[in-house]
Image (cartoon, grey):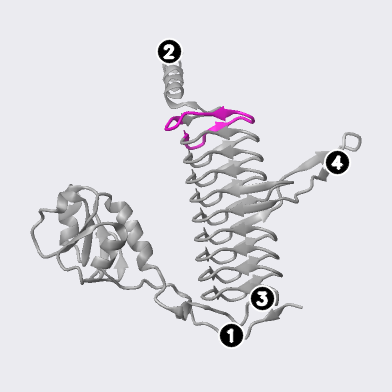
C-alpha cells in the first residue's frame, strides 16, 4: 500500500527558489570573465537595463547600449571587451560573450543556498518502494509511484504525477502538473515546464480491412531523456511503440511541441513552439526547427539543418546540409523557395 510521508508541510517561501547572493568576483570566475572595479560587490538579482534595481546584474552586447547600462540602477554590468576602457565607478564583468555569461551567472544565482528547499509536503503521496535521495523537494498533491527513483536536489512541484518505475536524475526541475508515464527515464539537470506529458502512448493503430475498424498497436516501448534537456509547457512526448523514443543531451523543446513515438532527437537540437513530429523521425545534432514546423513519419533532418517557421517535411524525406536553411512546404533550400515566391509575385502582377 502507498503511504503519505508525514514531513512537516513546507511554506511557499521554502519552496520558492530565491536567488542566492554572490560576489561579482565569484560570478566572474564561474563564467570565465574578469572584473573591473569592486569584485566584492554582492549581486542578488538579474534584470533588464530598464527595470534594474540596486543589487541587480544586467548585460550589454553592443557598445551603443553601454551608456544606458551605466546610467541604470544596476550594481553590476556584464559587457564585452569594448567596455574595458570605460571610466567611472560602476563595477564591470568583462566577457567575450556577454549574453552567454549573463545566462550562466543567472543560473549560478539560482542555485539553492542550503537544504531549506528540501522536504516532502504532507499532502504528497509517495509509494513506500520509491527511492528519494537527499535534497529532494516534493510539493503539494504530488504523486510518486511504485519503484520510482528521484535523484538528489530534484524539485517536484504541486500536482505532478510520477509513474511507477520512473527514474529522475539529479537537479531536475518539474513545474506544476507534469505527468510522467511509467518506465520513463530522465537524466540530470532536466527542466520540465507545467502541464507537459512525457511517455504517453504513441498514435498507432492497425486497420481491420474486413470491418474497417482500428485496433491499437502495442505502445510498449520507453522514453529516455538525457541530461540538460528543457521541455516547454504542455509539450507531449510519446514513448516508443516497441523500442524507444530518445531525446539526447542538451535538446531544447518549446511549449506545445508534440514528438511522436520512436523519434530520435539529437544533441543540442532546438524545436520551437507548436511543432509536430510524426513517428520514427530522426533529428540529428544541432538542428533547429522553427515554430509550427510539421514533419512526416520516418523523415530525417541532418546535422545543423535549420527549418523555417511553418515549414513542412514530407514522410521519408531527408534534408541535409549543415548550416543550410530550408523553408516552405515541402521544405526546400531557402534561396530556391524565395526565388519561387518572387516568380509567383511577378506572375500575379502580370495577370
* Residue situated furthest top in the rendering: 350
Question: Residue at left 48%, top 39%?
Answer: 287
Q: Earlier in the sequence, mark 2 or mark 1?
A: 1
Q: Residue at the far right: name it.
A: 210
Identify the residue position indicated by label 2 in the image.
350
Closest to the camera, between mark 3 and mark 2, is 3
Query: How many residues crowd mark 2 within 10 Å: few (<14), some (14–19), many (20+)?
Result: few
- Discs 4/1, front: 1
- Residue 35 can be seen in this image: yes
Viewer-proximal residue among 89 and 170: 170
Residue range of the region highlighted in magenta in the rendering: 305-325
Mark-to-mark CA distance, 4 and 1: 51 Å
Label located before the other in sequence (3 or 1) = 1
**Chain-order first, disc 3 or disc 4:** 3
In the foreground, 14 or 107: 107
Q: Which disc is residue 126 wearing?
A: 3
Q: Is residue 153 magenta?
A: no
Residue 310, magenta (yes or no) = yes
Residue named by callout 4: 213
Residue 50 seen in this snapshot: no
Question: Which of the labelled discs sits on residue 7, or is there none?
Answer: 1
Which element carries disc 1, helix, strand or loop?
A: loop
Q: Secondary structure at mark 3?
A: strand
Magenta segment main secondary structure: loop
Disc 2 element? helix
Q: For marks 3 and 1, give the CA distance.
A: 12 Å
Q: Is residue 131 left or right of residue 229?
A: right
Between residue 334 and residue 8, name the one nearer to us: 8
Amino acid at each position: 500500500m502507498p503511504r503519505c510521508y508525514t514531513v512537516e508541510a513546507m511554506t511557499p517561501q521554502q519552496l520558492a527558489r530565491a536567488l542566492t547572493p554572490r560576489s561579482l568576483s565569484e560570478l566572474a570566475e564561474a563564467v570565465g570573465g574578469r572584473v573591473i572595479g569592486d569584485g566584492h560587490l554582492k549581486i542578488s538579482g538579474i534584470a533588464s537595463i530598464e527595470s534594474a534595481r540596486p543589487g541587480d546584474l544586467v548585460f550589454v552586447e553592443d557598445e551603443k547600449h553601454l551608456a544606458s547600462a551605466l546610467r541604470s540602477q544596476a550594481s553590476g554590468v556584464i559587457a564585452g571587451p569594448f567596455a574595458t576602457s570605460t571610466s567611472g565607478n560602476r563595477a564591470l564583468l568583462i566577457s567575450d560573450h556577454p549574453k552567454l555569461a549573463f545566462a550562466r551567472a543567472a543560473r549560478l544565482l539560482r542555485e539553492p543556498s542550503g537544504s531549506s528547499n528540501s522536504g516532502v509536503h504532507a499532502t504528497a503521496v509517495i509509494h513506500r518502494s520509491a527511492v528519494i535521495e537527499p535534497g529532494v523537494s516534493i510539493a503539494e498533491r504530488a504523486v510518486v509511484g511504485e519503484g520510482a527513483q528521484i535523484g538528489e536536489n530534484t524539485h517536484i512541484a504541486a500536482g505532478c504525477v510520477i509513474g511507477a518505475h520512473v527514474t529522475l536524475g539529479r537537479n531536475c526541475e518539474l513545474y506544476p502538473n507534469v505527468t510522467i508515464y511509467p518506465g520513463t527515464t530522465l537524466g540530470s539537470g532536466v527542466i520540465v515546464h507545467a502541464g507537459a506529458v512525457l511517455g504517453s502512448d504513441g498514435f498507432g493503430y492497425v486497420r481491420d480491412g474486413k470491418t474497417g475498424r482500428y485496433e491499437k498497436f502495442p505502445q510498449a516501448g520507453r522514453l529516455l531523456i538525457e541530461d540538460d534537456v528543457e521541455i516547454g509547457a504542455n509539450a507531449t512526448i510519446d514513448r516508443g511503440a516497441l523500442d524507444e523514443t530518445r531525446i539526447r543531451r542538451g535538446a531544447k523543446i518549446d511549449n506545445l511541441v508534440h514528438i511522436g513515438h520512436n523519434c530520435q532527437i539529437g544533441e543540442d537540437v532546438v524545436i520551437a513552439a507548436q511543432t509536430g513530429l510524426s513517428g520514427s523521425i530522426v533529428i540529428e545534432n544541432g538542428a533547429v526547427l522553427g515554430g509550427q514546423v510539421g514533419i512526416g513519419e520516418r523523415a530525417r533532418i541532418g546535422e545543423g539543418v535549420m527549418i523555417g517557421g511553418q515549414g513542412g517535411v514530407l514522410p521519408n524525406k531527408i534534408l541535409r546540409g549543415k548550416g543550410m536553411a530550408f523553408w516552405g512546404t515541402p521544405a526546400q533550400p531557402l534561396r530556391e523557395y524565395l526565388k519561387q515566391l518572387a516568380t509567383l509575385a511577378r506572375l500575379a502582377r502580370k495577370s
